[in-house]
Amino acid sequence: MVIVLMGVTGSGKSTVGKLLASQLGWKFVEGDDFHSPKNIEKMRRGEPLNDADRSPWLEAIREVIRTTIDRGEDAIIACSALKESYRKLLQIRGQVSFVYLKASMALIQDRLKNRVGHFMNPDLIQSQFDTLEEPEQALQVDAGVSPAEIVQVIRNKLSV
């Protein structure tokens, strides 16, 4: 099984993903690791990525998902997957479950004030919400509760 944790920056994808993968003994894949240096620099400057910027990044994540499925492995992948078209690209043979970590603008602003060591410029928060197409085909979880609570909801709802 492949679970993609999706949502805007600061919603907890990496924190929840690492905790969930640890509990399940699954591989964790950090989607941010697949951004090109050009994209990272663009985000550091506070410039939002466009579909052309995201395309190679999404293709690389799709390849990781495809390889994981082909090998019969399980993985948790942290990837914003903000648009429906991105999620369709990442959905391979109906074997990917999306979990949407839904967060308010206020929660994200508060979290990013205290975030250090990440390339995402907090000025991009609004562009993330502007780009977001909330998924209809995903498990939706409140990103405002603790990571442990989120993991428990995911495990219960997806029976993992």
Image: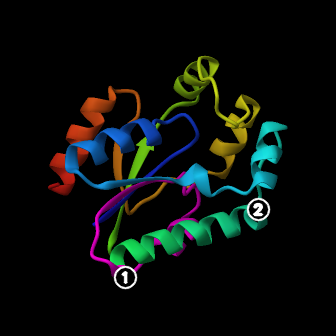
Which quadrant of the rendered structure holds the N terminus?
bottom left
Instruction: Look at the picture and state if 100 lies above or below 96.
Output: above
Residue at horizontal 77%, vertical 67%?
Answer: 52
Q: In which quarter of the view is residue 106 placed? A: top right
Q: Is residue 38 left or right of residue 5?
A: right
Name the secondary structure under disc 2: helix
Q: Position of residue 4 (x, y in %)?
A: 41, 57
Instruction: Look at the picture and state if 105 lies above or below 84.
Output: above
Question: Can you identify the residue that label 1 sits on?
Answer: 93
Q: In which quarter of the view is residue 85 placed? A: bottom right
Q: Position of residue 86 (x, y in %)?
A: 57, 66
The stretch drawn in magenta includes residue 83: yes
Tell me if mark 1 has few (under 14), some (14-19) or many (20+) residues whose alpha carbon lies within 10 angstroms of its own.
Answer: few
The stretch drawn in magenta includes residue 37: no
| Range covered by the magenta-colored residues | 70-94
Q: In which quarter of the view is residue 125 placed? A: top right
Residue at horizontal 45%, vertical 36%?
Answer: 12
Q: Is residue 88 in view from this perspective?
A: no
Residue at horizontal 62%, vertical 58%?
Answer: 34
Amino acid, disc 2? Asp
Q: Position of residue 55 (x, y in %)?
A: 69, 69
Amino acid, disc 1? Arg
Inter-mark Cα distance, 2 to 1: 25 Å
Question: Can you identify the residue that label 2 sits on?
Answer: 53
Residue at horizontal 52%, vertical 71%?
Answer: 62
Q: Is residue 156 left or right of residue 84?
A: left
